[in-house]
Image: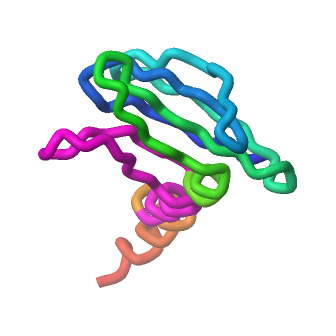
Amino acid sequence: MVATEIINETKGALSLKEGNAGVYRDIKNLEVGKKHIIEIDPNATYREYVVVSAPSGNKVFVTSDDCIDNSTITIIVDSEGKYGFRAVPRGEAKAADQVQGGIFSRMLKKVFSGRK
């Protein structure tokens, strides 16, 4: 199973739905600033997720491929008022953590800080 975090960074509530071939079921109402974890089996049938803005009806489509490729998907509204998403690819957050504060980098700092 692969887990992807969906985050609402819009100014309104969102409705998260899961479906296939245009038939969707409600998963969760996502309030402003809230998160929801979607777990996907990479070998399962293709799924599509639609995030709908409650007052305006704007939609953002997120595929199961998007979820498999990204650890975090943040729903946003751009400067023109269009809904979309910003994604963090899998491994990118882990790599940044290793560079900034992983055990290996801390060990290297100790080794090299003693050299002049």
Q: Residue at x 59, y 39 (%)?
A: 49
Q: Position of residue 20 (x, y in %)?
A: 72, 41
Residue 39 at what x, y percent from top left?
Answer: 72, 38
- Front residue of this view, candidates 76 and 47: 47
Q: Position of residue 1 (x, y in %)?
A: 80, 45
Magenta span includes 18: no
Seen at 41% across and 41% down, the residue is 74
In this rendering, the answer to whether 82 lies above or below 10 is below
Horizontal side, residue 68 vs residue 74: left or right? right
Camera-side residue of 25 and 36:
25
The extreme bottom residue here reads 116
In this rendered view, identify the residue nearer to me: 45 or 100: 45
Q: Is residue 59 left or right of residue 107?
A: left
Q: Quadrant of residue 59?
A: top left
Q: Which residues are magenta?
A: 71-99
Judging from the image, the colouring scheme is rainbow
Q: Look at the image and tell me whether residue 103 can be seen.
A: no
The residue most toward the left is 79
* Residue 10 can be seen, yes or no: yes
Give the vertical position of 2 relative to 8 (above or below).
below
Pinpoint residue 104: horizontal percent, then vertical percent. 56, 66
Which residue reaches farthest right? 43
Q: Residue at x 60, y 60 (%)?
A: 69
For the residue pair 32 and 83, the one nearer the viewer reads as 83
Location of the C terminus by quadrant is: bottom left
- Label count reads 0
Q: Quadrant of residue 14?
A: top left
At x 48%, y 32%, the residue is 51
